[in-house]
Image (spheres, rainbow, N blue to C red):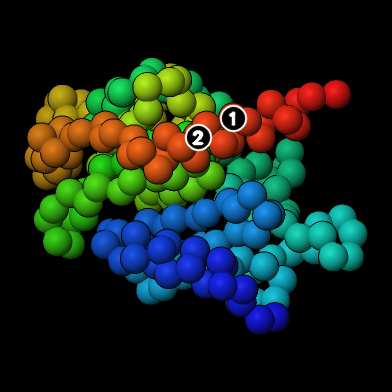
């Protein structure tokens, strides 16, 4: 399938953004036209049935496809995935206390967001600006902090493997890591805290937000 110009531009933009990610982290862009872009440090590509390496599975019917983030096709009550998937609401111009999860973590930003990730190999914090519709995968025990760049409340969708928010390993802070004697993790989390900035929204992003709101109002009109 030929790549349209707008899709090619989207792939280039996501590839540039993903080039500085730590090993194992991924970005997904869910476009308004229903196409999904996927990127990591190795490059960017479209996630779709035209790619034999995409790992898509037949989803109930022919020409329908599924991509598992958590669990797999064999998940059942006898073989649970032990995972959670939830909606989060983040206050305007705020960021979470830096933490690390005991299992991998996926977050879909539905508004302008940011995420600071600690790259253990390079020993530095990577700041990623997330546009609405961008999903980021954060590997197990990677220190990070998710923020809201906007002046409105931010909705996110988050999936975790293994732990609910009441579990002690759900969000390990620097203080918790120190109590456990995990000094390296504590130091990395403090570096994320020192670099933490929720960020701001650009003029172009504010304009795009206004257009999306206008589109939503049109779609809601009966």
Q: Residue at x 70, y 76 (%)?
A: 50
Place of residue 195 in the rendered image (x, y in percent of width and height, measured from the top left): 14, 38
Label 2 with label 1: CB-CB less than 8 Å? yes
Secondary structure of residue under mark 2 = helix
Q: Give the spatial CA distance, label 2 vs label 1.
A: 6 Å
Q: In front: 160, or 122?
A: 122
Image quarter for residue 40? bottom left
Q: Residue furthest right?
A: 61
Rendered view: 23 above or below 136: below
Place of residue 160 in the rendered image (x, y in percent of width and height, measured from the top left): 49, 38
Q: In front: 57, or 31?
A: 31
Which corner quadrant holds the N terminus? bottom right
Rendered view: 97 above or below 212: above
Image quarter for residue 177? top left
The tag on residue 83 is: none
Rendered view: 139 above or below 24: above
Say few, some or many: other residues with alpha carbon within 10 Å of mark 1 (under 14 / 14 to 19 / 20 or more): few
Secondary structure of residue under mark 1 = helix
Q: Which residue is mark 1?
A: 213
Q: Which residue is mark 2?
A: 209
Q: In front: 33, or 142?
A: 33
Say few, some or many: other residues with alpha carbon within 10 Å of mark 2 (under 14 / 14 to 19 / 20 or more): some
């Amino acid at each position: 399938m030929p790549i349209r110009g707008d899709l090619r531009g989207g792939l280039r933009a996501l590839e540039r953004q993903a080039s500085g990610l730590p090993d194992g982290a991924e970005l997904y862009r869910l476009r308004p036209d229903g196409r999904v872009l996927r990127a990591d440090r190795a490059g960017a590509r479209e996630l779709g049935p035209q790619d034999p390496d995409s790992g898509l599975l037949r989803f109930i019917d022919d020409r329908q496809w599924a991509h598992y983030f958590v669990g797999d096709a064999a998940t059942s009550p006898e073989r649970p995935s032990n995972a959670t998937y939830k909606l989060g609401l983040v206050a305007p111009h705020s960021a979470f206390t830096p933490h690390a999860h005991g299992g991998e973590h996926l977050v879909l930003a539905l508004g302008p967001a940011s995420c600071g990730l600690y790259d253990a190999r390079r020993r530095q914090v990577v700041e990623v600006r997330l546009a609405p519709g961008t999903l980021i995968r954060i590997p197990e025990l990677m220190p990070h902090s998710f923020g809201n760049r906007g002046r409105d409340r931010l909705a996110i969708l988050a999936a975790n493997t293994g732990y609910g928010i009441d579990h002690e390993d759900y969000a390990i802070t620097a203080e918790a890591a120190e109590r456990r004697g995990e000094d390296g993790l504590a130091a990395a989390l403090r570096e994320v805290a020192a670099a933490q900035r929720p960020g701001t929204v650009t003029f172009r992003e504010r304009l795009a937000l206004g257009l999306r709101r206008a589109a939503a109002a049109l779609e809601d009109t009966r």
